[in-house]
Amino acid sequence: MTGETGNGSDGARRVAQAIDALRHGWAIRVAADARPVSGPEAGQEAGYDLLPAETGFAQPGLFAARMLISAARAATLKLGNAREFDPAAPVLIRGHEPFTLAFARDLADPARDLDSPLRGPFRADPLPDADAARAAMELARMAGILPAFLVATGSAPAVTVSPADLALFRDVGALSIQTRARLPVAAADNAEIVAFRARDDLREHVALIIGTQDAARVPLVRLHSECLTGDILGSLKCDCGPQLDAALHAMADEAAAGGWGVLLYLRQEGRGIGLINKLRAYALQDQGFDTVDANERLGLPNESRDFPVAARMLDLLGVPAIRLMTNNPAKVAALCSVGVDVVERVPHELPANPHNHRYLETKRDRSGHLLG
C-alpha cells in the first residue's frame, strides 16, 4: 500500500483502513511532502511510522526513541504551556531511554497520572513534517483513541496515508438516505424514523420526524448528539437525557397544534471524541477538572462535532428553514454558515441537579451557552 494520492475514493479508502488499523493496534505510516534536497533533513524519508500507544501491541524488533503526543500532554510534562497554543497540536518528545508500550500507555492517559507517577526527564524535539503529525492526531480522534503514538522502527505499517488523503476522505462522504419507517414513540405515535449513511463515516445518523411534514410550516428542530450514559443509562453528570425527552415532548406539542418537528440524532458521542475518551474525561472530572480542562488534558478538542452533517440531513429531508431548539449560539452560527436558515432560536434549558451543576456552569462560562 502506498501513500500516493490517486482519486478521491483511493484516498478515502486509505484513511478508512488507517482508522481501522489504529483501532486494532496496528502501526500506520503517515506520509508527508518530500524533504528538501539540501540541508540537515536532506535525504531523510518524510513522514512517520506510528504505533498507537493505547491499542498497539509489541512486535519483534520494535524500537521507539520518540513519541508523538498532544501539546496539552506535553504541557503536563513541563514541556510547554497549553494555554499558548492548540492543546491538540502535536509535539515530538524524547525520553532518556526508549519507550516501552506499557510506559507509553501510562504517559498517554492523564486519567492514570495519580496511579502511575510520570518518569522523565523528557525533551521536546523539533517537529519535522508538521502536516503529517497533525494528520496523525486527527486520525487518532477519528478512531476514538488517545492522541499518542510511538514513533517506531520495526513496526511494519499496515497502511500508508497522507494529509491529502485525509482531505479527500472528507470530500467523498456523500450522505444518503438508506431507509425510513413509521416509528411510534412514547412522546408521539405519529412519527417516522429516517436513517442516513455516508461513505466517510462508520456511524449511521438518524432523524425522527414528529407530526406530518408540511413545507408551508417551519419545523421545530433539535440537534441531539448521542450520549449513551445520559440517553440510555440516565446519567446525572449531564443533561442529555432530560434534554432529549423534553425536545421530543415539545415536538409532540408542536404536532398537536398543527405543526411538526425533526429530531436529528447525531452519532457523535462526547462532542465528537467518542465514548471511551468521554469516560476518560469523566475520570478527570472526578479529579477536579471541568469539562473543558479534562478534554484539553486528553489532548482532544472541546468541540469536534460535525455540524455540516446535520445540514446535509436537513437538505435531504427537504427542510430549508428551521426553528432550532438550543442554548448554544455556536450551533446556530455553525448551521447558518453551511446554508441552513435558522429563523428562530428556541431556548432549551432544564433544571440542574447536584451532579451536573458544575457541568452546566462550564457550558455557560467557557463554551458560551446561554441561560434560556
Image (tube, rainbow, N blue to C red):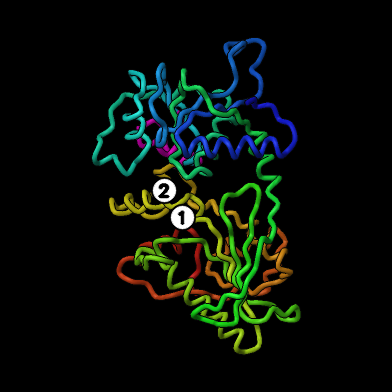
Question: Magenta region: which residues?
Answer: 68-86
Q: Amino acid at mark 1?
A: Gly
Residue 132: x percent and y percent?
A: 58, 30
Q: Which mark is residue 339?
A: none
Q: Quadrant of the N terminus?
A: top right
Marks 2 and 1 sit apart, C-alpha to C-alpha, by 8 Å
Q: Which label's residue is closer to the chain start, 2 or 1?
A: 1
Q: Residue at x 62, y 89 (%)?
A: 257
Q: Residue at x 50, y 22 (%)?
A: 156
Which SS class for mark 1? helix
Q: Nearer the viewer, residue 143 or 127?
A: 143
83 versus 130 height, above or below:
below
Q: Residue at x 41, y 19 (%)?
A: 62
Q: Residue at x 39, y 61 (%)?
A: 229
Residue 294: x percent and y percent?
A: 38, 49
Q: Which residue is mark 1?
A: 270
Residue 270: x percent and y percent?
A: 46, 55
* 363 lies left or right of 255: left
Q: Within the image, what quadrant is residue 38 found in?
A: top right
212 versus 326 height, above or below:
below
Q: Is residue 74 magenta?
A: yes
* 291 lies left or right of 165: left
Residue 102: x percent and y percent?
A: 32, 30
Q: Amino acid at mark 2?
A: Asn
350 versus 111 height, above or below:
below
* 335 lies left or right of 320: left
Q: Is residue 65 magenta?
A: no
Q: Which residue is mark 2?
A: 277
- The answer to the question of whether label 2 and label 1 lie on touching residues, with beta carbons closer than 8 A, is yes
- Residue 209 visible (yes or no): yes
- Residue 69 visible (yes or no): no
